[in-house]
């Protein structure tokens, strides 16, 4: 009988390294199975969505997002689809977007002609240093250009065009006396306004929304021959939600023995029968028929001042109160001796935190101080009393020089525009140059807001004005019917 053969199989015990390799292989196999299963689901038409598509967002969420984005980006989004165009073009969205937009500097270039209504405007958006200073991003991504061409053929809505047709023959017959003309651009609730001579004593008032390209022109009707009118600017009445033009008038100008006091007159836009009407009297015996140096609208009030004057006039559109505001006491004795020098070199009006802010430059030591007007405390204050101002900061100017009179002069005007997100203060220096000032460290950052090609083109425009402006998507037909 044959003996059975026993076959012995070797038993191999895995080492620690082999166990780890086996574990990795098992994990890889499991991952492969999951990947295959996911692929089978995709093949079966059941893809697993991880990122939510923007089309799946509700209109309320989209409006909430877009209302917080820069105006340039929102306007560009209108071309994406018809639903987006309808949403952005709706008046309700326009008002929501406007309420959430910060102030932005609007550079206005003009050739200083008393008859040319053309304005080249550059809106510079952004709330951070990297948004504004092109040395960070090497681009001007948030700068928009608007060309407001000559408006000689446009009419103003709500007025009989036969009465105010803007032809040369009709305009020459208009005898309104605005002396002198105020051509300074004023921004109010997204609309910019300015006035120009047309022919002889005729003055036209221009309104434009650079975002929507809406433009209108108003020729005032003939006025009494013994009256003097000084156009100031555009304002908004929060109580009635109406836009109004403001001018100061005085009758009996030719008869010095019977000269009446200056009165405030407004022209309400968007009403059935628009006309100039008296709303207040300036009780102060002041000569308001002078060249206006600066005009700015801030939170329901219009502020302006005259060349050589160290005080500010104000008009409250809600209360109809005209006031004369003294600036903080700084070099006023010296300023009275050199009034013209004071106006052009030492003071500028701007905006900070939705309040009037003035920058005062000392011609003695070259430092600049910023002051904010406390508007809640000016009502009822007499002209001889010191209006309450709060000092924001003191800074040393780095753009000073000494002129032939051996007085320190400043290259720019340090016009305050707004606070940035990190607490810096944005100010205008001169032409297209701006300054970002850090109050804590005292450092200044100087940058140019326009690219080289635009700067070369703008050299032909002699006059440059910077206007604190809040861009608005609301069209005139909706703005004037609120």
Image: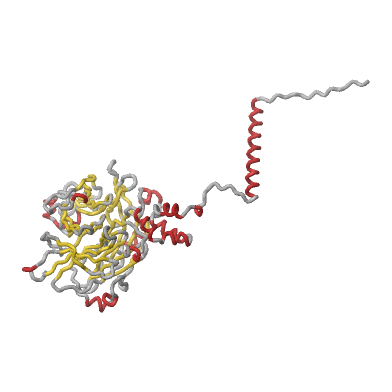
The one of 434 and 185 positioned closer to us in this rendering: 185
Q: Seen from this angle, which residue lies furthest bottom?
A: 169
Q: Seen from this angle, which residue lies furthest left?
A: 257
Q: Position of residue 38 (x, y in %)?
A: 62, 45
* Residue 202 occupies quadrant: bottom left
Residue at (18%, 46%) from the top-left corner? 365
Vertical order, 448 against 243 (above or below): above
Q: Position of residue 157 (x, y in %)?
A: 31, 70
**Left or right: where 466 falls relative to 58:** left
Number of numbered discs on residues: 0
Q: Position of residue 464 (x, y in %)?
A: 28, 60
Q: Quadrant of the C terminus?
A: bottom left
* Residue 106 occupies quadrant: bottom left
Q: Quadrant of the N terminus?
A: top right
Q: Seen from this angle, which residue lies furthest right?
A: 1
Vertical order, 71 against 6 (above or below): below
Q: Position of residue 347 (x, y in %)?
A: 20, 53
The one of 273 and 400 positioned closer to us in this rendering: 273
Q: Is residue 453 visible from the viewing direction of this image?
A: no
The one of 477 and 153 positioned closer to us in this rendering: 477
**Left or right: where 82 falls relative to 405:** right
Vertical order, 17 against 41 (above or below): above
């Amino acid at each position: 009988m044959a003996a059975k053969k026993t076959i012995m199989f070797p038993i191999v015990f895995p080492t620690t390294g082999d166990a780890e390799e086996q574990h990795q292989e098992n994990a890889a196999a499991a991952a492969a199975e999951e990947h295959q299963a996911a692929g089978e689901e995709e093949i079966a038409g059941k893809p697993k969505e991880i990122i939510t598509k923007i089309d799946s967002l509700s209109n309320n969420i989209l409006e909430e997002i877009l209302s917080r984005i820069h105006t340039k980006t929102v306007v560009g989004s209108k071309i994406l689809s018809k639903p987006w165009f309808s949403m952005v073009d709706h008046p309700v969205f326009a008002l929501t977007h406007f309420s959430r937009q910060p102030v932005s500097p609007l550079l206005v270039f003009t050739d200083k002609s008393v008859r040319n209504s053309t304005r080249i405007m550059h809106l510079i958006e952004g709330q951070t240093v990297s948004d504004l200073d092109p040395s960070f991003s090497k681009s001007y991504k948030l700068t928009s250009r608007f060309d407001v061409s000559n408006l000689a053929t446009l009419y103003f809505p709500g007025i009989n065009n036969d009465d105010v047709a803007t032809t040369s023959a009709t305009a020459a017959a208009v005898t309104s006396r605005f002396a002198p003309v105020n051509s300074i651009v004023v921004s109010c609730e997204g609309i910019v306004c300015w006035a120009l001579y047309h022919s002889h004593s005729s003055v036209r008032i221009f309104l434009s929304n650079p975002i929507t390209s809406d433009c209108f022109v108003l020729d005032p009707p003939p006025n009494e021959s013994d009256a003097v009118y000084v156009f100031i600017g555009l304002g908004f009445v929060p109580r009635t939600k109406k836009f109004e033009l403001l001018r100061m008038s005085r009758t009996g100008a030719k008869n010095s023995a019977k000269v009446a006091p200056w009165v405030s007159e407004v022209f309400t836009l968007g009403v059935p029968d628009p006309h100039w009407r008296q709303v207040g009297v300036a009780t102060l015996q002041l000569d308001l028929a002078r060249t206006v140096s600066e005009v700015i609208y801030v939170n329901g009030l219009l502020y302006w001042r005259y060349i050589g004057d160290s005080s500010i006039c104000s008009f409250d559109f809600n209360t109809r109160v005209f006031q004369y505001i003294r600036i903080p006491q700084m070099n006023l004795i010296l300023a009275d001796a050199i009034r013209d020098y004071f106006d052009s070199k030492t003071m500028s009006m701007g905006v900070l935190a939705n309040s009037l802010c003035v920058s005062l430059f000392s011609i003695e030591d070259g430092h600049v101080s910023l002051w904010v007007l406390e508007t809640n405390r000016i009502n009822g204050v007499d002209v001889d009393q010191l209006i309450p101002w709060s000092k924001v900061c003191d800074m040393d100017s780095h753009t000073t020089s000494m002129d032939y009179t051996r007085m320190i002069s400043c290259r720019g005007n340090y016009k305050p525009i707004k606070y940035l997100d990190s607490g810096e203060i944005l100010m205008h220096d001169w032409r297209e140059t701006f300054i970002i000032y850090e109050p804590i460290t005292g450092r200044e950052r100087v940058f140019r807001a326009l690219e080289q090609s635009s700067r070369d083109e703008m050299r032909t425009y002699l006059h440059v004005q910077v206007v604190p402006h809040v861009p608005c998507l609301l069209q005139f037909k909706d703005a004037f019917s609120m």
